[in-house]
Amino acid sequence: MEFDLAQFQQELEKRKQYIDRCLQKYLTPSDAYPPIVHEAMHYAIFNGGKRLRPIMVLEGATLAGGNQESTVPVACALEMIHSYSLVHDDLPAMDDDDLRRGKPTCHIVFGEANAILTGDALLTGAFAVMTESVGMVGVKPDNLIRVIREIAEAAGSQGMIGGQVIDLQSEGQDIDYETLKTLHSLKTGKLFQAALRSGGILNDMNEQGLQSIDEYARNFGLAFQITDDILDVNGNEEVTGKHAGSDAKNAKTTYPGLFGLEKSRQLAEECVKACIASLQEFGPEADFLRQLAYFTLERQN
């Protein structure tokens, strides 16, 4: 498959804009009382994210031959959970970052206490938004309950939070490849897996199909994290929107730190090949996901 970066970025931007319009619908208005927390929620959400997780929810629905529109509330909810995690990740007690996607981080703008509450509000609000799928075309209650459970587990102590805990405990420590891989499989990969699976589950995808897209998302998450580590070393700050070298500043073990840049890129390429192989049972309906995997190797932010 040929990959045209410019054309793919246009397609990605179209999907991002669609998700942004949907998020506007499901977020509490920024001027609702008390305004500071709702302003901060909008600030945290609308700060230039690529919307990969909600886009994956919709792609899961497409692969299942189902209805994308019915999955939109879950897609928006996943972006809210992702955004909450970034707000908390940037806090002084965590990574202590003052820049996110080229803008001051939430706690810099609204204060540390309000940033903590903003993250809490995004997380709890996400589960309310998921229930908006009730009664939509083709959505079975049992499937929605399964999705909510999988997302909760992916975001919890044996998913994203667990990965963040390992990340914090590993600062300044020499950790091996398996620990690093586990860290990122939990911290980054689990939400990608939950996203793609959610679209499939809501549209009655069979277990074989779910296993295939789960494998795709797991490898995609690792490829994404490896390239993220590479960009932290040699990325352009004006493009990445964050300070270069923040991983080294926080004494984090990274793929380039363990293997060097060339070997890290090879590992990312192997993950992308595994992504493509996992989609072999699907036809042209999976072409966007195939291109998305290639995109991880070319992205600049």
Image: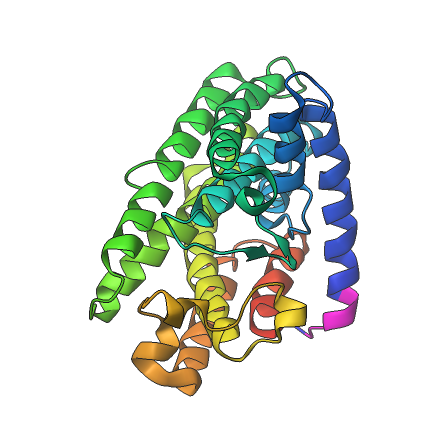
- Picture quadrant of residue 172: bottom left
- Picture quadrant of residue 183: bottom left
Question: Viewer-proximal residue, 168 or 148?
Answer: 168
Question: Viewer-proximal residue, 94 or 180?
Answer: 94
- Residue at image location 72% in from the left, 48% down from the top: 16
Residue 263 coordinates in the image, percent (x, y) = 39, 84
- With respect to residue 91, does 10 lie above or below? below
Which quadrant: the N terminus? Answer: bottom right
Residue 92 coordinates in the image, percent (x, y) = 41, 49
- Residue at image location 57% in from the left, 57% down from the top: 99
Q: Is residue 300 among what the camera can see?
A: no
Question: Viewer-proximal residue, 159 or 123?
Answer: 123
Residue 197 coordinates in the image, percent (x, y) = 48, 40
Q: Is residue 4 magenta?
A: yes
Residues shaded magenta: 2-7
Would residue 301 appear left or right of 269 to someone viewing this image?
right
Residue 264 coordinates in the image, percent (x, y) = 41, 78
- With respect to residue 192, does 275 lie above or below? below
- Residue at image location 57% in from the left, 64% down from the top: 242
